[in-house]
C-alpha cells in the first residue's frame, strides 16, 4: 500500500504514537513501556544514554563519504579533504543509483533498539497485531546543521555534502522501512524525520531559504512506501512544513499549539489534502509533573476546537490526529519517561471516549 492510498483510507482517530528516544541505557526495560503505552503504533527505541554511537547524528552517519568518528573524543564530522574522498563519493552514488539498500544499513552497534528491540516487539504483538509500526530518522536540516566538516562548518552549506546528506538519509529511511516490514509484515509503516533544528529557520544560524528546506524534506521523504512525517519540537515557520509533501506534522502542542493555530489556511489545505497532525501535548520536561489527563485533555480540546471551521470540522481533525509526547524522552529520568508515555495512552483513550471515536 502506498502513501497516497494510505492517506485516503487510514484514520488514526487520536492514536497514541511516540517520538524516538528513551532514557534507559538498555533495550529490554523500554519494551514493556512501548508494548503497554503504544499498543497500536509501536516504535523501535533510540537509546542515546546507552552509547555515543546511538546519538541522533552518529546513528545515521554511518557510511557517509568523508565520515570521521572519534570515539574517544565523542566527535563525529565529515572531512572532504580525505585523499580518497572522490572514490568514496563514486561508491556512494553508485549505491544510490543501484538502490542498494544494504549499503545504507544501520549497524547493530548504532541501533540496539532496532536490531534487538523491534524483533522482540514483533514477538510480543504476535497475538494482537498493532495498526502500524513507526520508525525515525534524523532530518536533513538538523543533520546538515548539526554535523560539521573538519573546520567545524555546518555541512548543509556545502552543495556537495548537502546533496550527499539528503540522499544518504533518504536511503537510510528506505532501508529502515524495509526492516520494519520484515518484522511486522503486512503493516503500514510511519517514518518520522526529526527536525529539532527547524526552530533555527529564519535566524542567522540557518540561512537556508524556504524553498531549499522544502526541497530537502521532499527529497528525503521520497520513495518511501509508507506514511512520512516531520517532527519539530519548537516554534518555526509552520507554513514551510505544511507546504512539503510529507503526510504528517508532529509538533509541540503543549508549548507551541497556539503558534500553529495562526496558520489556519495552510492547516485547512494540509488536512483537506489528507494530511495528519500529531499533537505533542504531553510535555517531555519537568512540566509533566504538574499535569494529568484532565489538564492535558482540556488543553488539547481547546486547541482542536479553535482549529475547527466550516472547511475543517472538528470530526475531521479528530479522525486525522495522533497524540504524542512533545519530544523524545531521552533527556528525562526513566520515571518521568514512564509518566509521559502513560499520560499519552490515557489521553488517547480519554479523547476517543469523549468524542466517540
Image: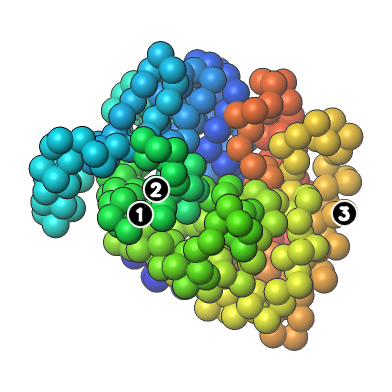
- Which residue does the numbered mark 1 point to in the structure image? 158
Disc 1 packing (10 Å; few <14; some 14–19; many ≥20) = few
Residue at x 74% of width, y 43% of height: 282
Say what secondary structure mark 3 lies in: helix
How many marks do you count on the picture? 3
Q: Is residue 172 above or below residue 50?
A: below
| Residue under label 2 | 155
Q: Which quarter shows the C terminus?
A: bottom right
The quadrant holding residue 127 is top left
Q: Is residue 306 left or right of residue 208?
A: right
- SS category of the residue bearing label 1: loop
Point out which mark residue 298 bears: 3
Q: Are marks 2 and 1 in contact (CB under 8 Å)?
A: yes
Looking at marks 3 and 1 on the same chain, the residue that comes earlier in the sequence is marked by 1
Q: Residues within 10 Å of mark 3 (few under 14, many from 20)?
A: few
Q: Which secondary structure, mark 2?
A: helix
Amino acid at each position: 500500500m502506498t502513501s497516497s492510498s494510505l492517506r485516503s483510507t487510514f484514520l488514526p482517530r487520536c492514536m497514541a504514537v511516540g517520538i524516538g528516544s528513551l532514557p534507559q541505557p538498555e533495550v529490554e526495560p523500554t519494551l514493556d513501556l512501548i508494548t503497554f503505552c503504544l499498543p497500536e503504533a509501536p516504535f523501535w527505541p533510540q537509546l542515546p544514554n546507552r552509547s555515543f554511537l546511538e546519538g541522533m547524528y552518529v546513528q545515521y552517519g554511518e557510511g557517509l563519504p568523508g565520515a570521521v568518528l572519534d570515539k574517544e573524543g565523542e566527535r563525529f564530522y565529515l572531512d572532504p579533504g580525505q585523499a580518497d574522498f572522490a572514490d568514496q563519493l563514486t561508491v556512494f552514488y553508485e549505491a544510490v543509483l543501484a538502490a542498494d539498500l544494504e549499503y545504507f544499513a544501520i549497524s547493530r552497534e548504532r541501533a540496539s533498539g532496532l536490531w534487538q528491540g523491534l524483533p522482540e516487539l514483533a514477538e510480543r504483538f504476535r497475538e494482537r497485531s498493532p495498526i502500524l509500526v513507526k520508525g525515525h530518522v534524523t532530518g536533513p536540516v538538523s543533520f546538515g546543521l548539526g554535523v560539521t566538516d573538519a573546520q567545524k562548518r555546518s555541512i548543509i552549506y556545502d552543495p556537495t555534502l548537502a546533496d550527499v546528506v539528503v540522499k544518504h538519509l533518504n536511503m537510510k529511511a528506505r532501508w529502515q522501512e524495509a526492516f520494519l516490514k520484515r518484522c511486522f509484515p503486512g503493516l503500514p509503516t510511519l517514518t518520522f524525520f526529526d527536525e529539532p533544528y527547524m526552530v533555527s529557520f529564519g535566524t542567522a544560524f540557518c540561512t537556508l531559504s524556504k524553498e531549499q528546506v522544502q526541497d530537502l524534506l521532499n527529497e528525503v521523504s521520497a520513495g518511501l512506501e509508507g506514511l512520512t512525517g516531520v517532527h519539530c519540537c519548537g516554534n518555526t515557520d509552520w507554513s514551510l512544513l505544511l507546504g512539503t509533501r510529507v503526510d504528517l506534522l508532529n509538533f509541540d502542542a503543549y508549548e507551541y499549539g497556539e503558534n500553529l493555530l495562526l496558520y489556519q489556511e495552510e492547516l485547512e489545505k494540509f488536512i483537506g489534502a489528507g494530511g495528519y497532525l500529531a499533537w505533542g501535548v504531553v510535555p517531555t520536561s519537568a512540566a509533566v509533573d504538574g499535569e494529568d489527563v484532565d489538564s492535558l485533555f482540556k488543553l488539547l480540546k481547546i486547541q482542536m476546537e479553535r482549529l475547527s471551521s466550516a472547511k475543517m470540522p472538528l470530526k475531521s481533525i479528530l479522525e486525522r490526529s495522533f497524540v504524542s509526547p512533545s519530544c523524545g524522552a531521552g533527556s528525562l529520568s526513566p520515571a518521568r519517561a514512564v509518566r509521559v508515555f502513560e499520560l499519552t495512552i490515557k489521553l488517547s483513550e480519554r479523547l476517543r471516549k469523549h468524542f466517540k471515536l
